[in-house]
C-alpha cells in the first residue's frame, strides 16, 4: 500500500530517536511504500502545510492512506479534515486505531510526538494499517454521510 507521510517539526524533536524517520522506516519495513510529504528537519514549520500535502496525495490517487505526525495529532487532524473525502482520526491507542478503520474507514491516521512513545506509535500504526474497514451496512452508511 502507498502511504503518504507528513510531519511538522515535532517529528524531529529531541531527544532522539527522531520519530519521523523512524516511523517512515517502520512502515516501509512492513511492506508499504511511503511518499514523504515533509518536513525534513527540526526547523519550525506550519503543520497545516504538511497535512494538506498528505491529503492532496490521497485525493489525487497517489496514496491510498496517510499518516500525520505533530505534537499531539490534533492540529494535523483538524487541518486534514477540512478536505472532503478525508477522514482523519487522532489515535492514542491501538483500540482507537482499529476502531477508526473498522467503524469510520479512516484514511488518515494522526499521532502525537509529545503524547505517545515511539513504541506506542509503532503499535498504533501497525494496527491501523492492518485493520480493514467494516463492510457492515450501518458503517458504510455512516461513512457515506461524511462526504
Image (tube, helix red, strand yellow):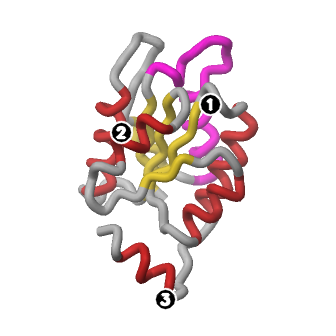
Residue in the picture at 56% in, 28% down: 21
| x and y percentages locating residue 18 in the rendered image | 61, 21
Asked if residue 21 is among those painted magenta in the image, a careful observer would answer yes
Quarter-wise, where is residue 13 in the image?
top right
Q: Nearer the viewer, residue 49 or 60?
A: 49
* Residue 22 image label: 1
Q: How far separated are the C-alphas under marks 3 and 2?
A: 30 Å
Label 3 or label 2, whichever lies nearer to me, is: 3
Q: Is residue 110 above or below residue 94?
A: above
Q: CA distance from mark 3 to mark 1?
A: 37 Å
Residue 86 pos. (x, y %): 35, 57
Per the image, label 1 sits on a secondary structure element best described as helix
Q: Residues within 10 Å of mark 3 (few under 14, many from 20)?
A: few
The circle drawn on residue 137 is 3
Span colored in magenta: 9-31
Residue pictured at 29% horizontal, 40% vertical: 52
Name the N-terminal-most of marks 2 and 1. 1
> What mark, if any, has residue 51 been given in the picture?
2
Observer-nearest of 141 and 39 = 141
Q: Position of residue 97 (x, y in %)?
A: 62, 56
Amino acid at each position: 500500500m502507498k502511504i503518504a507521510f507528513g510531519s511538522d517539526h515535532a517529528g524531529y524533536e529531541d531527544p532522539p530517536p527522531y520519530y519521523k524517520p523512524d516511523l517512515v522506516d517502520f512502515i516501509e519495513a512492513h511492506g508499504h511504500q511511503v511518499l514523504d510529504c515533509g518536513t525534513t528537519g527540526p526547523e519550525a514549520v506550519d503543520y497545516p502545510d504538511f497535512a494538506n500535502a498528505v491529503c492532496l496525495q490521497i485525493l489525487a490517487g497517489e496514496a491510498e492512506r496517510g499518516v500525520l505526525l505533530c505534537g499531539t495529532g490534533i492540529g494535523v487532524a483538524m487541518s486534514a479534515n477540512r478536505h472532503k473525502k478525508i477522514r482523519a482520526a487522532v489515535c492514542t491507542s491501538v483500540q482507537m486505531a482499529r476502531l477508526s478503520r473498522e467503524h469510520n474507514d479512516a484514511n488518515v491516521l494522526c499521532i502525537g510526538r509529545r503524547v505517545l512513545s515511539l513504541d506506542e506509535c509503532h503499535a498504533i500504526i501497525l494496527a491501523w494499517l492492518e485493520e480493514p474497514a467494516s463492510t457492515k451496512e450501518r458503517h458504510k452508511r455512516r461513512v457515506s454521510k461524511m462526504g
